[in-house]
Image: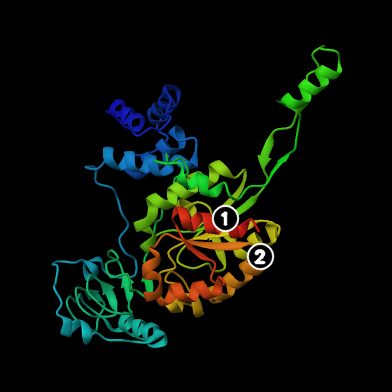
Amino acid sequence: MLISFFYTLRAARLPVSIQEFLALLEALKVGVIGPSVDEFYQLARLTLVKDEANYDKFDRAFGAYFQHVEQLTEALKDLPADWLEKLLERELSDEQKANAPKLDWDELMKTLKQRLEEQQERHEGGSKWIGTGGTSPFGHGGYNERGIRIGGQSQQRRAAKVWEQRDFKDYDDAVELGTRNIKVALRRLRRFARQGAAEELDLPGTISATAANAGWLDLKMQPERHNQVKVLLLMDVGGSMDDHVHRVEELFSAAKSEFKHLEFYYFHNCVYDHLWQHNQRRHREKHATWDVIRKYNRDYKLVFVGDATMGPHEILQRHGSVEYNNDEAGAEWLQRLTHAFPHFVWINPEPQGVWEYRQSVSIIRQLMQQRMFPLSLGGLEQAMRLLSK
């Protein structure tokens, strides 16, 4: 059985060796884990994957191989599971959508607390209780301009807050680019210097020294030239950014290839009081944004990558994050970052033609002092030219 699993991983271009596969089999033989798919997943990833950049490839290959295996999941702790089970796809009329309850932020949180205390059974298709398929501000599968999505999948992308454990994946920095355009654009941001040990042949110096030495060969060596530009890359991940994963991965891959001094972190929608470097461990391994600001010098070039598409309250209000109650508004953190790193740009993968129709994009552009550029060849060239000044 696991022989074909090994070949599935190799077919997914994962550098898995026979020795690592034998280590996995030996661990299974001695009973390191119990009869659990989740535990096998953790053990297999531990023994077979050497680079965290390959985690998403492993996840895809693992899912493809075990797609027919039932995986254990935890039941929702706070609500009965059948309350959020979407039994049918309900088509709501324009009138029903127009009459959907519209609550401001404080009313929304206060009303949710009341519903949790009062609700006793499942509801579907309504406008008041926690349920599915209706116009209630609480639940999923229906329609509400500004509600709290509980469970389910994002459809309208209008939720003011999301009540669930959300899992994102790291961008793959090993994506093979179809063209060299992104790398060519990024090369506009270069400042070469020769540092370190003299390990590279200095051909002009060797010729001059040999000529001065009456033709006797006199080899001259010099340090290699490296791009000394330092880049701090902050990338939006999850939600509406799922539509842009491939293009952002191309940018990430090109940046890691072009910049020797590259540091990167993830955020979701807007930057708040913490960032993270591994999406699989983002709830356990957080980096305080203040620590990031203090860790890197002002000579780092700060590059945000995100579609800037969110509710305006996520940028301007305390507790505006869709995932948790942030003590300070995202705008405050964006201003702190741009003050700490005076050379900054925002790269937006959304088409530039839609920017003017999204209020959050306009807000971010103002906070970025209009330094927002599209994720295109021309946009990247403009951004790199600005950063190089």
Please state if 378 lies on the left or on the right of 81 as rendered. Answer: right
Kind of residue at badge 2: Pro
Q: x%, y% of residue 77?
A: 34, 66
The residue that mark 1 highlights is 384
Amino acid type at mark 1: Met
SS under mark 1: helix
| Depth order, front residue of 307/385 | 385
In this rendering, is residue 41 above or below 276?
above
Q: In the rendering, which numbered label is found on residue 342? A: 2
Asked whether 32 or 19 is in front, the reply is 19
Identify the residue at image location x=36%, y=65%.
Answer: 164
Q: Is residue 242 above or below residue 214?
A: below
Labels 2, 1: front one: 1
The part of the image, by quadrant, that contains residue 361 is bottom left
Quadrant of the drawing holding the N terminus: top left
Residue 72 screen position, x and y as percent: 29, 50
Q: Residues within 10 Å of mark 1 (few under 14, many from 20)?
A: many
Q: Does residue 155 appear to the left or right of 197 in the view shown?
A: left
Q: Position of residue 98 (x, y in %)?
A: 22, 85
The reply to whether residue 35 is in sight is: no
